[in-house]
Image (cartoon, coloured by chain):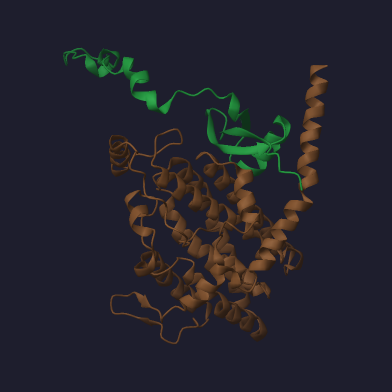
Amino acid sequence: MTPPQDWALYEVFVRAKRGLDHKHVGSLHAADAAMALEHARDLYTRRQEGVSLWVVKSADIVASAAEDAAAFFDPAEDKIYRHPTFYDIPKDVETL
Amino acid sequence: MYTQGLQEAPPKAASAVEDSERMARFQARIDAEEKIEPKDWMPEAYRQTLIRQISQHAHSEIVGMLPEGHWISRAPSLLRKSILIAKVQDEGGHGAYLYSAAETLGIARSELIAQLLSGRAKYSSIFNYPTPTWADVAAIGWLVDGAAIMNQIPLCRCSYGPYARAMVRVCKEESFHQRQGYHAMLSLARGTPAQQRLAQNALNRWWWPALMMFGPPDTASQHTALSVRWKIKRFTNDELRQKFVDFTVPQALFLGLTVPDAQLRQAEDGHYQTGPLDWSEFNAVLKGNGPCNAERIAERREAHAAGAWVREAAIAHAAKRAARAVA
């Protein structure tokens, strides 16, 4: 028997209902994108969990590195003035 | 359907060269109930423990399709047949979710499947028992899936994110499995004397193997301490087994069936105490000497080999379409 050639790995995103974002639910193997969509339907929406599916080849996803997360996200850390709660407004000022 | 505390060589201890500072950060994150995600640093023993546990769990789902699958063509009504097809399809789905979670740890699904087919990997020993009657299918749903739920609900809070998320999905679907099994059991228990006998005999066959699904007693379990510290495991084998017994005995009484344990009694604190479990049987099945070990693996190998042309043809077809799109 020839050694098995695994089908490509795809990540699956499901929109649970209109108005919501697509959300990552897992991955699966498929020979091509059309098959990935059908497999995603059978695997992740057997109980009507979705109204729309995205499949993306896992190899095509560019991700930030976990070990660099602290430094990578550091620029936002000391900018508390970006949050509305930073500002003390006198009580008399309403509707603000 | 299920994972159990299978016993193998304990995981390699973390090598001394592994950075103790990173180790401390890793443990602190787990202690703080934060999840570990695929790209995070993790001790090699944690990775290996998870690969082993998740893949054994996945294999159990896949092999678990066989004992019930044999009854699809013989289910007693069209409705029962539809239900059984849906359940067996779910088990295949659970296997796929779990292989997907295992792959995030850096091992290919093809490698995991090769481990199963070569007999190197283990799967839950419960699936090495036969299903001689329709009542066995009902008993599997009620007892085996019931025990599985007991085991799997704590895994939804496992420290490894992809495993925990897969288990949330599995648990949502598992409740249907148990309820349809109990429902089928109830039909038999309320049926003719012959049907009642079928139900009782199936309970007799599955009761003890179901209790053994929780793995060896705590006194003999090698993995518990480390797995508890890493929050892969939240309860010990004996704790989960006790909970299952307490839930299940009243369900059996409601069916009008007798639990096949002469020593079973309810203690003053409300817990049911069982007689001793025959661990020599468990170990024999685990070692490959159960009633159906050889048959199950042979059937998986045959299915894998028979499907090879489909896998290859799909790749050839995809390549042809891609070439046409370029042209």
Above/below status of B272 relative to A81: below
Quarter occupied by residue B42: top left
Quarter occupied by residue B322: top right
Q: Locate residue B89, reporting x and y percent.
A: 66, 53
Q: Locate residue B17, reporting x and y percent.
A: 34, 39
Above/below status of A30 relative to B56: above
Out of B176 and A76, give the one closest to the viewer.
Answer: A76
Q: Is residue B316 left or right of residue B248?
A: right
Q: Locate residue B220, reporting x and y percent.
A: 38, 68
- Quadrant location of the N terminus of chain B in the rendered image: bottom right
Q: Locate residue B265, reporting x and y percent.
A: 38, 83
Residue at position x 62%, y 55% in the image? B116
> Residue B56, can we see it?
yes
**Chain identifier for the brown-coloured part of the image:** B
Q: Is residue B311 left or right of residue A13?
A: right
Q: Color of chain A here?
A: green
